[in-house]
Image (spheres, rainbow, N blue to C red):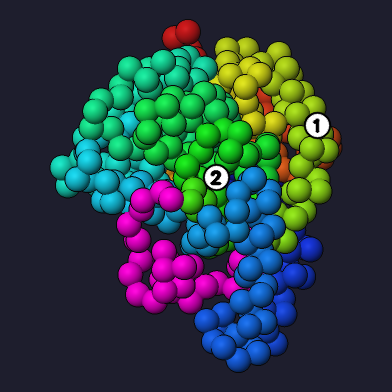
Amino acid sequence: MKRIYLDYAATAPCDPEVQKAMEPYFFHKFGNPSSIHSFGQEAKHAIEDAREMLASFLGAKPEEIIFTSGGTESDNTAISGVAYALQAKGNHIITTAIEHHAVSETCKALEKRGFVVTAVGVDKQGLVDPEDIKKSITDKTILISVMHANNEIGTIQPIADIGKIARAKGIYFHTDAVQTVGHIPVNVDEQNIDLLSLSAHKFYGPKGVGALYVRKGTRMERFLHGGDQERGRRASTQNTTGIVGLGKAVELCKKNMREEMKILTLLRDRMIKEIPAKIPDTILNGHAAKRLPNNANFSIKYIEGESMLLSLDMLGIAASTGSACTSSSLEPSHVLLAIGLKHEVAHGSLRLTLGRWSRKEDIDYLLEHLPKVVENLRAMSPLYEKK
Ligand code: PLP
């Protein structure tokens, strides 16, 4: 059976070149990067090379990069770290209604500890209005956290404008760029970003490794206590192998990203044009133009997303209804509710996300089978009968 992967937003395969770069660090180059002997120094140099590679990709300085275990740890560290460092100054955090749980659950945990969180809403296309952020600022606001692009509907936020507002008020600005780094350009200076989270497995690196950019001079409490690795900002022996993989993945994105953006945009736009044309009562979720080159998200009315995923899976097509982290929950996506969809429409969502190995033939196969899957499910749907 054909196997077609259309769930790159959940995770991407590790590029074979990344795998090759990592291999020596599993065995021959296994030293602890904190050791002073040659084994340790070899590992340390590899980490510093990856740090330089990532820093230059983001327009940052190497000393502003902290390696972490992934996007979730980076988000937790940034938000809790700034909140606790600045609690004497204020207790107000501004975020949005469509953040990944790595951000929203961290904010909820802080609310239990006396912080006050404002979650700004979005419009029907999932865009945050920078004016709404501005209006939410109080003299107690210490942090603004707005994701760069949404993991479900792909809408890209006006990050530079929001960063400008934060900068003018002297408030730290964090962005969860887990879905954007390696896929669209990111530059911390041009976009006025003070803290930025990323994760290697979203851009063809290994799982379980990520990074947090922290602008020089930013006050942030450490999250993991212990040794003085990462300049005392993140304890624990570094994941040398993973960091080498992250560095190589960045190098490949630096080389390929512009071209990949063009190719994926064409494939994405074909899905956006043809799926609603072939399947009546289907709407595109997210912004038509301000969206990730690899993301298409639809609400297909009168059916249930999970049944559609299972039917597609039986045909070898891997897709998703939304965030992989909440896929076991029966609750409709908070992102789709935030853009104003009714519960029953939000339940029929389908996220199709592309990547480095997506091909025209994959989309041909999808376009051939998806309409039939929907037709079969609708034939059994009481909602469709009542239509
Ligand atoms: N933030 C966003 C926007 C994501 O899409 C994800 C992963 O799906 C995360 C954070 C969490 O990243 P990780 O899986 O590396 O912890």
What residue lies at 66% left-to-right and 19% top-to-bottom? Answer: 289
> Which residue is nearer to you in this view: 262 or 273?
262
Q: Nearer the viewer, residue 314 or 77?
A: 77
Task: Give how far across and how far down residue 346 sits, in percent.
Answer: 44, 24
Q: Is mark 2 within 8 Å of ligand 1?
A: yes
Taking the image as shown, residue 109 lies to the left or right of residue 295, namely: left
Give percent across and percent down for residue 201.
61, 55
Query: Residue at coordinates 41% horizontally, 64% vertically from top-left?
Result: 233
**Image: 102 above or below 193:** below
Residue 335 seen from this side: no
Looking at the image, which residue is at 28% across and 51% down?
85
Between 227 and 184, the one lying in front of the other is 227
Q: Farthest residue toward the bottom?
A: 37
Q: Amino acid at mark 1?
A: Lys
Does the magenta run of residues contain 231? yes
Q: Are marks 1 and 2 in contact (CB under 8 Å)?
A: no
The residue positioned 68% from the left and 48% from the top of the image is: 57
Residue 223, placed above or below residue 134: below
Name the main secondary structure of what is drawn in magenta.
Answer: loop
* Residue highlighted by disc 2: 178
* Residue 92, placed above or below residue 256: above
Query: Does 189 sit left or right of 138 as displayed?
Result: right
Query: Is residue 178 visible to us here?
Result: yes
Part of the protein shown in magenta: 217-246
**Label 2 environment density (alpha carbons within 10 Å; few <14, some 14–19, many ≥20):** many
Percent x, y of residue 379 = 55, 21
Dot 1 falls on a residue whose secondary structure is helix
What residue is pinned by disc 1? Answer: 262
- The answer to which of marks 1 and 2 sits earlier in the sequence is 2
